[in-house]
Amino acid sequence: MSETVALARAVLSGIVSKGDGEYTHRMSGVSRCARDAVLQAQGHKWSNPPRAEWGDQVTFDMGHSGEARIVRYLEKAGIQVVAQQLSVLASSPMGERITGHIDGILLIPEGMPMGGKRYLMDVKTTSNYGYAMVVKDGEPKRAHKEQLTGYKYSVVDDDDYPLQRGVMVKDLDYPGYEWGGMIVIYHPKERPTRGYGNKKEELDRLAFIHFDADEDVHEASTDLFDLIQHHITNETLPQIPDPADEMVWGGWDKTKKRHIARRCSPRWCRRYDICREIG
Ligand code: SF4
């Protein structure tokens, strides 16, 4: 290894994450692998921590600073972003408490596109490839749709908002702004393009994906927490999901001509070795 590579790795090793602490039901985990969550709740530490050179913390921090930047851009355009980082609390179909924080609520003034309405907002920093996919589909990624829908049906649980405590996020009242649904603002890490060679085209630098979803989506996705709690209470472990299951990023591999669970690898699963050892 050259000295310059060693130097870069020395810097990265100072920010590498060592573990994920104690398990609690969090809305940001609505699409995680149930088996991984139960292993965490049962006290299993990471068997496959991230390698320093992957710089996963850098990616996480880019998302965090990207969010602050987008809020600045929105405010500069005259769009208020209220209830930023508001603490909220949801309930699963069986009554499990699920905590979360919303990125904010957009108040888009009359006269602007989609104006006169309020929108529950979340900012997601993506790869160029993921960005091109959501732009093409016009739909948020499933995990993002489930997360935001969970927030929509959460209630305020924040000491800084005593008057709103217990009010459902979708019902938070901002006079002059009726409920307009949810917006995921996708923000690619690089200048976004689509296609190759002379068919390559530039994409807009931000994508606002607007959608709404009803309570049945919230119930269908948060029953994951009931499943996790069932196993925690009974001291059991969910089976390894089928490789086609979206929970483990299952998808058809054209080369291998079979489904593969992309999440089930030491690169993406921090408890891969434990999971396989327990069987
Ligand atoms: S290896 Fe796959 S099934 Fe096992 S805990 Fe990790 S993501 Fe879940």
Image (tube, rainbow, N blue to C red):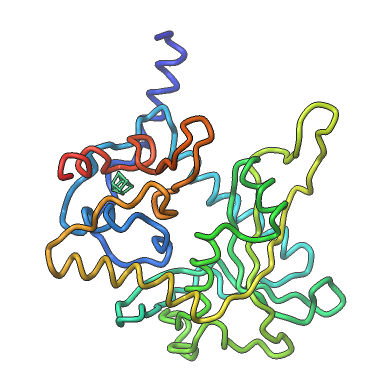
Residue farthest to the top, as pictured: 2
Q: Residue at x 48, y 45 (%)?
A: 251
Name the outermost residue toward the left: 235
Residue at x 38% of width, y 35% of height: 267
Quadrant of res 117: bottom right
Which quadrant of the view contains residue 170?
bottom right
Q: Residue at x 73, y 38 (%)?
A: 191
Position of 189 relative to 39 (above/below): above
Q: How many numbered marks have been drawn onto this rendered protein structure?
A: 0
Tell me the quarter of the image containing the N terminus: top left
Residue 236 vertical placement versus 279 (above, below): below
Coordinates of residue 131 in the picture (x, y in percent): 66, 47
Observer-nearest residue: 259 or 40?
259
Out of 30 and 45, give the one closest to the viewer. 30
Q: Position of residue 101 (x, y in %)?
A: 46, 69
Residue 214 horizontal/vertical position (percent): 55, 80
Q: Position of residue 247 (x, y in %)?
A: 40, 55
Q: Quadrant of the C terminus?
A: top left
Find the residue positioned furthest to the front: 257
Location of residue 122 by image quarter: bottom right
Front-lying residue, 61 or 262: 262
Q: What residue do we see at 69% from left, 79% from top?
A: 180
Is 237 or 122 nearer to us in this picture? 237
Residue 2 in the image: above or below residue 200: above
